[in-house]
Structure formats: C-alpha cells, structure tokens
Amino acid sequence: MAHCSAMKRFFLPICFVLTLWALALMGTQALFAADRVRLALPAKSMGYLPLFVAVHRGFFKDEGIDIETSMMLPQLAHNALLSGEVDYHGVADSALRLAARGAPLKAIFFGARRPNYFFMAKPEIKSVSQLRGKYIGMARFGDTIELASRIALSRAGLDLQRDAVPILIGLPATRVAALTAGSVDATIAVPPDNVLLKQKGFRELLFLGDVVEFPSNGYATSDRQLTEKRDLTKRVLRALYRGLTFARERADDSIRIIEREWKVDNAVAGESYASLAKSFSRDGTASEAGLQFHTQHIQKADKHMGDIPLNRIVDFRLLEEVRQGK
C-alpha cells in the first residue's frame, strides 16, 4: 500500500502538468487558427499559375491562411465579391470596368503583364487574313477575348463585325471544343489548350502578347476588404507574390506543379510553361501604359465616361509594402 501511495504521489503531479500542457497547446492552436479566405476564379486557367504554386508550395499556410477557391462566371464573381460571399476574385479585367463606373472594387495584383492569348485556327487556315467571312468563337461582347480578337483581325486589315462572324460560345473549354468540332474556324485559346490544339494539328496564328500589352490574370477585392482586412489582404498578396516569383524563377519545379494540378504529361506541361513565361508579371503590378490600354477601352465603350484616375481602379500600396519586405 505504501508503495502504491508513493507511486500516486509521483505520477499525479506529472499527469497534472501534462494536462495543463495539453490545454495550453489546444488554446494556442485555437489562437493561431488559419484564417479562411474565399477566392473565386472564372476558370481553372494556367494563367493563375502563381496562385496554384502558392497553394502547392504552402505559401498560404505560411501566412496562416486556409485558401478556398471556387469557379464562378465573372458577373457572379463580382456580385459575390460585393456581397461579401467571397473575399477576392480573379476577374480583375472586368473589375476595372466596374471600378471605373464607381463600384467599390480595386485590382490589387496581376499575374501577367500582357495577355496570354493565342489565336488558334483550323489547320487549313494559314494566316489571320484568311479569316475573312469565318466564324470566330468568343466568350462575350466587351471582354478582353473580344478585344484581343479585334486586335488580331485588325492587324490583317479586318474588322471583327464587318469582315468575320463572331459567335458567342462562353468558357474556354467550350470554345476549344467548338474549334475541335469545326463549329468555329478560330478562337482565342490559353495554355494548355493552345499546346493541345497544336498537337492535334490546329494552327497558331498569333500570340497576342506580341502585339499588345495590357495586364491580365489579375485579382481584385472590395474597398471594404482593403480597409477592414488590411493585414489579411497583405498576407494574401505576400503568398501570391512568392508564388509569382517561384513560378518565374524555378521553371522545372513549376512544370511539375503544372503536371500535377492540370493532369498533363511533362511535354505538355513544359510547352505550356514556356507559353506562360512569355507573359509573367515582373512584380504583380501593372504598367501605367498597360492600365491606360484598359481605361481607353472602357472610355471607348462608354462615351459618357470621363477621365479615369488609376487610383480609382487599382491599389498596389499593400503589394508595394510586400515587395519592400514590410
């Protein structure tokens, strides 16, 4: 009995200490629980590679962020952002138009400094000039796909409305399927679709980034999020910035991420990466000339639109702090 009492006196303090330690650990974990961030994308495009790199490499986890991505059509993504259903979205190009008209939105990061668009056509079409009278697959009127199509045709002296037949089809996969089936003669494709189409014999007529520069694959948020969740937004930007830097500087590792995330073989992943690398942003910001390209397009579409100050549509201040290591 004396032996048992001694054992109890020995183990009880240890059990008490272990219990306190476990409770303290649980409290610490609760205190530092990851912040949930909801982000909407219009499609699972490789143009958002810096985001997926940041997920695969754990850059969001490093910032204490649990990132949740969902796919939404652009208008639904805007509505969700304004209502607070999502915190950020990857539809910055059309967010610029809404912000110019007074919507409380700002673009805060761009993954590409120029459009990662490839004008793809049927094998028998060898040049843009041969698209006269042909069917051109597009997403919708007024978006950057239509703008890119107009620019591509104008280089051959053609007008999209007058000299071709624009067909509204929708999402990238649908446009590619329409081209493959022969329902349209040409369309804008993005990686890996441009690579896969070339493997099937379709022709790349033009890389739009060679003829025009405007930022794309950007992220936007609400003015409220920028004001009320400043620290969280900065952490999101830090993860994206690290993802962009990694994608730009570490090609082989990024190609392996492409293989895993998009379920493509190494050859397709490598060629897709080479396509993406043509457009990577240097630091997540956008040039003044590139942004003015957007504002001029907005003003052309809305004759009553006056001057559009850039600070009405973009806010790179937090990104600049991230770049400076603050």
Image (cartoon, rainbow, N blue to C red):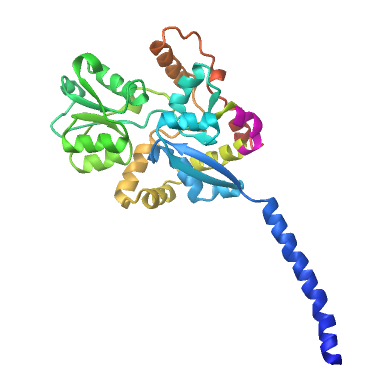
Q: For the C terminus, give its image quadrant.
A: top right
Give the tally of numbered discs.
0
Whole-percent x, y for residue 278 in the image = 38, 34
Viewer-proximal residue, 128 or 22? 22
Q: For the N terminus, give its image quadrant.
A: bottom right
Q: Quadrant of residue 143?
A: top left
Residue 217 shows in the view = no
Q: Is residue 6 left or right of residue 320?
A: right
Whole-percent x, y for residue 121 in the image = 20, 31
Q: Is residue 177 left or right of residue 72?
A: left
**Main secondary structure of the magenta stretch:** helix
Viewer-proximal residue, 27 or 236? 27
**Magenta stretch: residue 58 in it?**
no
Residue lying at 58% horizontally and 32% vertically, measured from the top left:
319
Residue 313 shows in the view = yes
Q: Quadrant of residue 150?
A: top left
Residue lying at 22% horizontally and 18% vertically, measured from the top left:
156
Whole-percent x, y for residue 197 in the image = 23, 40
The residue positioned farthest toward the right in the image shown: 2
Residue lying at 34% horizontally and 51% vertically, measured from the top left:
263
Q: Which residues are magenta?
A: 224-232
Whole-percent x, y for residue 62 in the image = 60, 49
Residue 61 against residue 174 in the figure, above or below: below
Residue lying at 42% horizontally and 36% vertically, measured from the top left:
72
